[in-house]
């Protein structure tokens, strides 16, 4: 149990560092989603399923949706400016 | 001058949070703070009839706080709608989605909607509730908005649903205020049989209302962000 939690925390740390290092913005957004998902699994293991569901729904799904729309919109603006 | 002011502000915030979290960083020996949780755990099932203690806290013991949260979300949605005003004209499609993506999203949407409804309706029995269920429904809407060319998204209906849901939340609270309990959000309905769907008085009603409100609001936000100019 403790080892599983430690593994999850390490995955989270790696994803968190990778968010800073990757060049592509979309990859960074997906990596933040990975962090949220791992956090929600950790919440589930420390016996707080309510928070886990909320984190998975808002942190992993809705935040990603908002970021992806924003990236999509800004990218299309950039390409039209270039042309 | 500006540096001095910002330093003072920063020092003020640090002082504020240090006093706020003082008991957390430096552990004090008193067990009084933890007794609240134990007390609620032992009393909530009998008092509220809700099998999920977290829900009983969110909806009844801290119901007014939930009303504040819903208001904050409403203001945020309003801000996004004003900021990203829809132009009305249809944006031309740049991407041509594949057949599999379109069909898959059409298949996925009802399932996501159903799951969100399940989460909302069983908020007082199992983990979940109005907020996560509403967000799941909004995510389902987003899946269908992202893939299909033309969606008949009725913005007026969404606004009406949102307003009615907010009004019913306050109305339920006021009914409790006028009733025998004489307090806002008093549980005025019979508690029913423990651990069944129709139990726990007004908790399922309030969570249904919150779920409808959150779902409609966030769907409108996603729609406004996607369709605005």
Image (tube, rainbow, N blue to C red):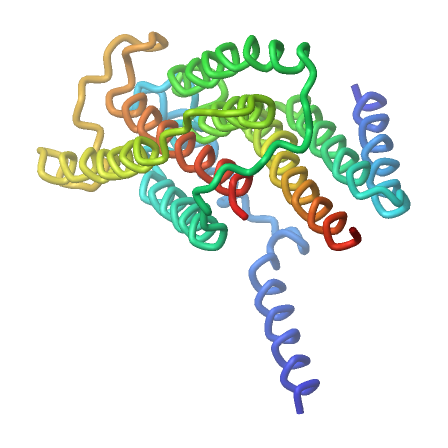
Judge from the rendering whether residue B127 lies leftward or rightward of residue B158; answer left or right: right
Q: Quadrant of the N terminus of chain B?
A: bottom right
Q: At which x and y percent is residue B124?
A: 39, 19
Q: Please name whichever residue, B217 or B153, is drawn nearer the observer in this view of the structure.
A: B153
Q: Please name whichever residue, B40 or A25, is drawn nearer the observer in this view of the structure.
A: A25
Q: At which x and y percent is residue B172?
A: 20, 33
Judge from the rendering whether residue B33 lies leftward or rightward of residue B155; answer left or right: right
| Residue at screen point 65% across, 74% down | B10
| Residue at screen point 25% across, 25% down | B202
Judge from the rendering whether residue A15 lies leftward or rightward of residue B59; answer left or right: right
Q: At which x and y percent is residue B95?
A: 69, 29
Q: Please name whichever residue, B88 or B120, is drawn nearer the observer in this view of the structure.
A: B88
Q: At which x and y percent is residue B37?
A: 47, 35
From this view, report whether residue B158 is shown above or below residue B96: below
Number of disc labels: 0
Q: Quadrant of residue B134?
A: top left
| Residue at screen point 61% across, 77% down | B9
| Residue at screen point 64% across, 22% down | A44
Q: In the orientation shown, which residue stands out farthest toward the bottom?
A: B1
């Amino acid at each position: 149990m403790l080892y599983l939690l430690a593994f999850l925390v390490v995955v989270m740390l790696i994803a968190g560092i990778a968010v800073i290092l990757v060049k592509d913005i979309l990859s960074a957004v997906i990596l933040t989603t990975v962090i949220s998902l791992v956090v929600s699994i950790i919440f589930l293991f420390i016996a707080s399923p309510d928070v886990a569901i909320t984190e998975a729904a808002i942190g992993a799904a809705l935040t990603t949706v908002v970021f992806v729309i924003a990236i999509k919109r800004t990218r299309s603006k950039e390409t039209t400016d270039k042309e | 001058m500006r540096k001095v002011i910002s330093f003072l502000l920063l020092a003020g915030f640090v002082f504020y949070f240090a006093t706020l979290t003082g008991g957390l960083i430096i552990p004090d020996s008193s067990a009084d703070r933890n007794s609240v949780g134990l007390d609620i755990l032992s009393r909530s099932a009998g008092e509220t009839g809700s099998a999920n203690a977290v829900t009983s806290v969110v909806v009844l013991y801290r119901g007014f706080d939930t009303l504040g949260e819903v208001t904050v979300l409403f203001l945020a949605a309003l801000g996004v709608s004003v900021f990203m005003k829809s132009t009305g004209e249809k944006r031309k499609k740049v991407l041509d989605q594949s057949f599999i993506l379109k069909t898959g999203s059409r298949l996925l949407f009802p399932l996501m909607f159903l799951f969100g409804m399940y989460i909302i309706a069983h908020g007082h029995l199992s983990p979940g509730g109005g907020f996560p269920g509403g967000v799941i429904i909004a995510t389902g809407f987003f899946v269908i908005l992202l893939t299909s060319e033309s969606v008949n998204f009725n913005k007026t209906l969404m606004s009406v649903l949102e307003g009615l849901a907010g009004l019913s939340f306050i109305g339920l609270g006021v009914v409790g205020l006028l009733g025998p309990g004489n307090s806002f959000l008093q549980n005025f309905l019979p508690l029913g049989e423990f651990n069944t769907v129709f139990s726990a008085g007004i908790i399922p009603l309030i969570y249904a209302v919150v779920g409808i409100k959150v779902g409609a609001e966030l769907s409108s936000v996603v729609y406004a962000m996607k369709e605005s100019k």
